[in-house]
Image (cartoon, rainbow, N blue to C red):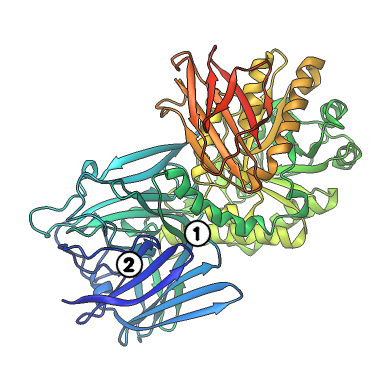
Amino acid sequence: MSIHVLNEYHLGDMTVRYLTDDIQKQVSLILLPADMPAPSLKKNEKLDSLVQLKITGDAYDDAYALGNSMRSSETVHRLSFQEQTLEKDHGQTTIKTILTAKGMYQVTHCLVWKENSRYVKIFCTLENLGQEEFSLEMFESVSIGGLSPYLEGDGHGQMYLHRIRSVWSQEGYAQRIPLEELQLEPAWNPHAVRCERFGQAGSMPVNKFFPFAAIEDEKNHVFWGMQIAHPASWQIELYRKDDALAMSGGLADRDFGHWMKHIRPGQSFQTPQAIVSTAHTDSLDIFTGRLTEAAEEGLLAVPESEHDLPIIFNEYCTTWGNPSHENICKILDCIRDKGFQYFVIDAGWYKEEGVSWDVSMGDYQVSKDLFPQGLEKTTEKIREAGMIPGIWFEIENVGNASRAYQMEDHLLHKDKKPLTSYCRRFWNMCDPWVERYLTRQVIETLRKYGFGYMKIDYNETIGIGCDGAESLGEGLRQNMEASCAFLEKVKREIPGIVLENCASGGHRLEPRLMGLTSMASFSDAHECPEIPIIAANLHRVIHPAQSQIWAVIRQNDPLKRIVYSLTSTFLGRMCISGDVTDLTPEQWQIIDSGMEFYRSIAPIIRNGQSRRFGPAVSSMRYPKGWQAIVRTGTDGQAYLVIHVFDLSAPEQIQIPLPESCPEQIAKIYSEQREAIQVEDRCVYYEIKESWKALAVLLE
């Protein structure tokens, strides 16, 4: 079978190459760094289709695929190339590739590139052209093939998978795994399918892995990678039978995510978007910065109040779920004129006496005990103090102490029973009654009291899915699409509102929801030593301008501890909480200084490139060594943040500065004089104690 180039397009610093063959007329998608044209290497490889889907009843690929992978099925092999079009409109290039199984179905593969961006977005649309309904059981958003174009044979010993794990309060743990350890090297005969499929099933899309993967060619310093923009079950697959390696991803399939979708004659279905890139670099940080750059599209549309990345005060770690008019007024007396933009009333404002906040959400009646004069007086006091009032809601879930918990007709079901966790149930977001109820309880509350900020929490996962559609996974997908639609309604009804995406901290840090909100809670790690580790890790998967990081200050905190906490927030958005009514003038002085430093680096947080230095941290709970983040801006400034975890670190650390990084120290944030200097494009810092932090502004 002869393989040749169908078309090739240069998109910024990337080359998009489409390959096809003369017999089956399949099409494959290859991405290459523009400065590295692929050499002609002799390889034992077949064309891998740029679309991956499977219809029930169709044959699987070669041996041992069943239960392992649905890729390269009979559904794919029926398709043949029909046409490819290129459209340019207002700085956007769209390439559509149409494949058809005559008289049965058609797939349109869509690749979108915006001028000057360093990534593409890819999705696929299927249309039923036949006379009978069929059922999809797998339909991925993207598939890129030929992921070892610069290496002889299968590239053994040179190829690595990067993926990022996540669990509650320890988000962002990075893995770099040789493909051989995943048994992704071909056998002596290309007979058996090799597949590493991973992802997450449920409504917390970052509840095991981030929807991210990258392949590294270590020898040639090239990366390929993707993020899946989907708020529910997803999967990413690495797949090979021969020298070729392919990577695909999108909706979790029937095996992995209990997903099936019936497609009637004339009906179409579109996958979620995938963000995809390639780069010639030896730095994972540089590569992932290309993917998180996609967040710029959403950041351009945030409310005006967000443009300078203002500082948030959240009272949760001050009152611990017991906010009241009285204690909020005491807080306001202490923080007015400190430069906070938002004051967020967190969970508990609705709770009845004797009932915990985390089992009573859903009814959302303002507590008369906590707010005897109603919320009007409290929000009035917040505005008088010069801040925008914010409020917490857990929109989609209800607690077992609420009246809403008993409204079973309007809740999600599984196997015809209310879907129940240890203390929560879930609204059926597709139910028109629920939309009306939430409009009244949520949107009208925001409007009535003039809230300009809403923290949207989400503290349990639906799991594999729910009743109401042709499969549990499709029920989940539809429910989460309805949740996204409700957020869009909030933004329409309350123009200019700032939305915070929270899901037990960081369980929803995926591109779709991040694109609907201004920022996100980075984690539920409020006072832990691992906060800067998590915050630094997240630079690889979300834009730091959207990463809200807690600095909880306690009355007995020494100044060194306050600096450790405040410098952690320099890795994203600053959010302060804690014992602010009981702090000394000396403590406030170091906090004020930290807030001033944050404001000076906010433009670099908003527009910059991060690089991490230091030994890998194997245990987040008991970290050893040190880390440094250097973030270089676009206006001749940069800053670095150093955290030392214990005395196992060397006496002096050396941090090489990137070529574009300035070298002049303009400002240092610390509680003491520091032995730090820049010489020959390196920062040298003498470590004298553990659990120590500082930040340096360079210009």
Mark with earlier residue (1, 2): 2
Q: Which mark is residue 118?
A: 1
In the depicted structure, whether residue 38 falls above or below residue 552: below
In the depicted structure, whether residue 689 falls above or below residue 376: above
Q: Residue 695: where, in percent of width, then height?
A: 63, 28
Q: Residue 519: where, in percent of width, then height?
A: 64, 47
Could you say which is closer to the camera, residue 193 or residue 103? Answer: 193
The residue at the far front in this view is 680
Image quadrant holding the C terminus, namely top right
Left or right: 369, with 357 as reference point: right
Q: Is mark 2 on a helix, strand or loop?
A: loop
Residue at the image point whose x is 60% and y is 62% from the top: 431
Residue at the image point whose x is 82% and y is 35% from the top: 339
Q: Which mark is residue 52?
A: 2
Residue at the image point whose x is 68% and y is 38% from the top: 601
Give, as a three-letter code, the residue at label 1: Arg
